[in-house]
Image (spheres, helix red, strand yellow):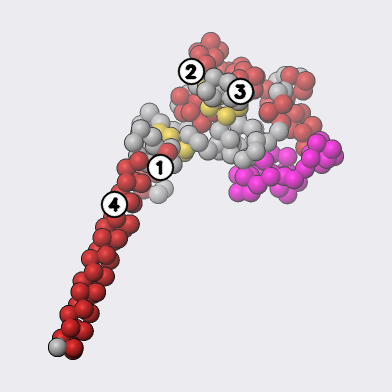
Amino acid sequence: MGSFGFVASLMRSARVGLMLLVALTVIVGVAYPAAVWAVGRVGSAGAEGSPLTDANGCVVGSSLIGVDPQVPAGQPDPFFHLRVVGSVADGDAFAPGDPAAALPSNQGPSSEILAGFVEERRASIAAREDVTPQSVPVDAVTGSGSGIDPHISPAYAALQVPRVARVTGLPEERVRELVAEHTEGRQLGFLGARRVDVPELNVALGLTAPRCAQVSSGG
């Protein structure tokens, strides 16, 4: 009887342990991941990276990540441009395409290096937009905290309107209308400042649409 009772107790413990294992597997391994997956996709595309698509349905980037478009030197530039990257790499004041863009520069307000880059950026942007250096807004020559901010100030967008209209052939009024359509208000009505979403604005202008066939084929 003693041996039988021991075996019976062992079997009961094994059944309890097995039932607990199954229950935790269902809760932690199935129900919880399914709930997180569902919540992440209700009313938001954020869980998918907030993909940005063009008129052809091609994914051309993310609406949350600013990637400044570049054109070959000497070619007409039809794009609205973002703020400069947050870091300074290899002595380049703009550092386009630098993967370290999301890193801080560690250059403070008293930094002569930062002041030099700001002046270089101001002169370059003024030449690109055919305006005086004093007309260039502050956000155009200073990096955002993340270095990948997709927004610029309405003032910087307005500065770029004449060039974009001239290169694309669109009336300035139409370009200004598109800027207004992609201008976001202050968060909750009082946080932050009004801002223009540049990736979405460029897509609205039809400037970042790749050919789907090339993208799907990897060409």
| Mark 4 residue element | helix
Q: Nearer the viewer, mark 3 or mark 2?
A: 3
Mark carried by residue 47: 1
- For the residues carrying marks 2 and 4, which lies nearer the camera in this image? 4
Q: Nearer the viewer, residue 33 or 130?
A: 33
Kindly identify the residue that appears in the image at 24 percent across and 74 percent down. Answer: 13
When the figure is inspected, residue 12 is found, relative to residue 191, above or below; the finding is below
Q: Which residue is mark 2?
A: 181
Q: Which residue is mark 4?
A: 31
Residue at the (53%, 27%) spot, across then down: 197
Apparent side of residue 174 relative to residue 34 in the rendered image (left or right):
right
Q: Is residue 167 visible?
A: no
Residue 99 in the image: state x and y as whole percent.
Answer: 60, 49
Please, which residue is most extreme toward the front here?
1
Give the main secondary structure, helix, strand or loop, of the magenta stretch: loop
Q: Position of residue 156 (x, y in %)?
A: 64, 22
- Distance from disc 1 to disc 4, alpha carbons, whole Å, reads 18 Å
Mark 3 lies on residue: 193
Give the mark nearer the N terminus: 2 vs 4. 4
In the image, what residue occupies the spot 79% across and 32% down?
119
